[in-house]
Image (spheres, helix red, strand yellow):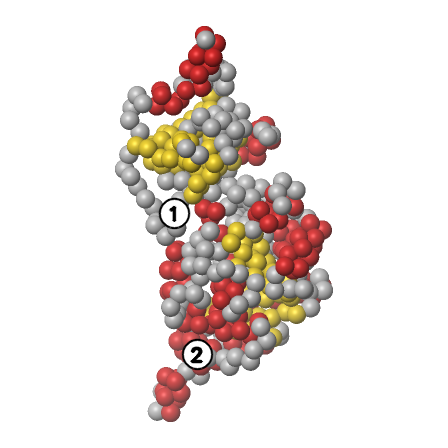
Amino acid sequence: MFSSIEDQNRAGAPQNMLPLAAGSRLNKGKPTYLICRTVRSGQRFEYPGNAVVMGDIHPGGEVVASGHVIVMGTLKGVVHAGAEGDENAVVLAFRLQPIQLRIAGYITRAPDNEGDFDSGEPEIARVQDEAIIIDKYHPGTEKRWLTKSLKQEEVEQNG
Amino acid sequence: MGEVIVITSGKGGVGKTTTTANLGAGLASLGKKVVLVDTDIGLRNLDVVMGLENRIVYDLVDVVEGRCRLKQALIKDKRLESLYLLPANQTRDKSAINRQQMIKLTEQLREDYDFVLIDCPAGIEGGFKNAVAGAEQALVVTTPEVAAVRDADRIIGLLEADDVEALRLIINRLRPDMVRKGDMMDIEDIMEILAIDLLGVVPEDEYIVVSTNRGEPAVLGGHSKAGQAYHNISRRLLGEEVPFLNWETGNGIMARLKRLIGLG
């Protein structure tokens, strides 16, 4: 599903995209991409791995990744994490106010007529009991979610 | 078979999208089955004006490129049962679709809906040509400004060349007070230049700003002047004879009173 080269060219962004070390502890085997820019309306980034946005995602902007998505800013656009079906993928944002949020095959949207809701703190979205839930983000606890697939792999390998 | 109507203007910012949203809501509230098609690929707005942005999963380009079925891309309005929206894609540009695809799409839609309203992008290039491809009727939106009327005239010429049969005019953002003072083009001036049937006049109304920002078409909310005007235009689209309001013709009660006492 990733026609990523074409998509990146369209957004005019490859120079801002730095793949981190492949196989980092975040999500084994998947590279992590760094998007060093504000994702504006009409821009779409699609990556086969994790994505970290160093900036905001504006309404109408889209980030699609097969792994986790972390936004070091305000997420007001659309993010699809685990786009290839990974239900363990999470979306973590400094301010999580998405128009729409997708994780694997699950989709959720902002409630109607409530305007911008600002919880005032970082939040993390993940799939639990066949639905996307949003939790307050406590530093440290992300390991539980971000390294889940890694731990599972270790368990599988060891026994 | 439903009617396929394109809402166009040439110039940007005269109210095509607002008109599309309000006439769609107006027709649907009068019991018709309506689908709105946003053809402004890359600069979509209709979903925001309708307050349906958060529901978009598939769009017009996904449909024509076969990534989803038409029914999957249609978004049902949150207020009206019989109103649907086919949103534009935001990440592509006007060349993502062509005329044949639009003709095929409108043929498909008109089988299920009484009205297919197409929101046209500004300009006269590819996006405009795609939008008018499947339309048999056009509503030309203009404002009482020389530049907007000039562009509307150009658009009418292009529509006539494209064999769009029924052309009707909507004059938007008219300020009766300025017309009375002679500071703004009046309806007769505009009709004289454009020489097509007048379908309705929408007054300048602050409530449009409020309703647009809230994502609720003005025609549904309360009793604003613009909402009333759009309601009347919707009824005229259904073939009803609806008399023009006083301020639409510039013969308001105040104007008549002033004329009586020699001020007008």
Q: Which residue is mark 2?
A: B247
Query: Quick check: B126 above or below A28?
Result: below
Query: Where does residue A46 sit, x and y in percent of width and height?
Result: 53, 30
Q: Is residue B21 left or right of residue A148?
A: right
Quarter that holds the C terminus of chain A: top left
**Identity of the amino acid at label 1?**
Pro
Q: Residues within 10 Å of mark 2 (few under 14, many from 20)?
A: some
Query: Where does residue B124 sit, x and y in percent of width and height?
Result: 62, 56
Have a look at marks 1 and 2 and say if they share a chain. no
Residue drawn at point x = 38 percent, y = 35 percent? A133
Query: Quick check: A6 above or below B193?
Result: above
Q: Which residue is mark 1?
A: A111
Q: Secondary structure at mark 2?
A: helix
Query: Quick check: A100 above or below A158?
Result: below
Residue drawn at point x = 69 percent, y = 49 percent? B101
| Mark 1 in CB contact with mark 2 (< 8 angstroms) | no
Q: Secondary structure at mark 1?
A: loop
**Identity of the amino acid at label 2?**
Trp
Residue drawn at point x = 40 percent, y = 40 percent? A98
Query: Where does residue A21 sit, x and y in percent of width and height?
Result: 47, 15
* Label 1 to label 2: alpha-carbon separation: 39 Å
Chain letter of mark 2 equals B
Count of number-bearing discs: 2
Query: Where does residue B132 sit, x and y in percent of width and height?
Result: 65, 58
Q: Is residue A114 visible?
A: yes
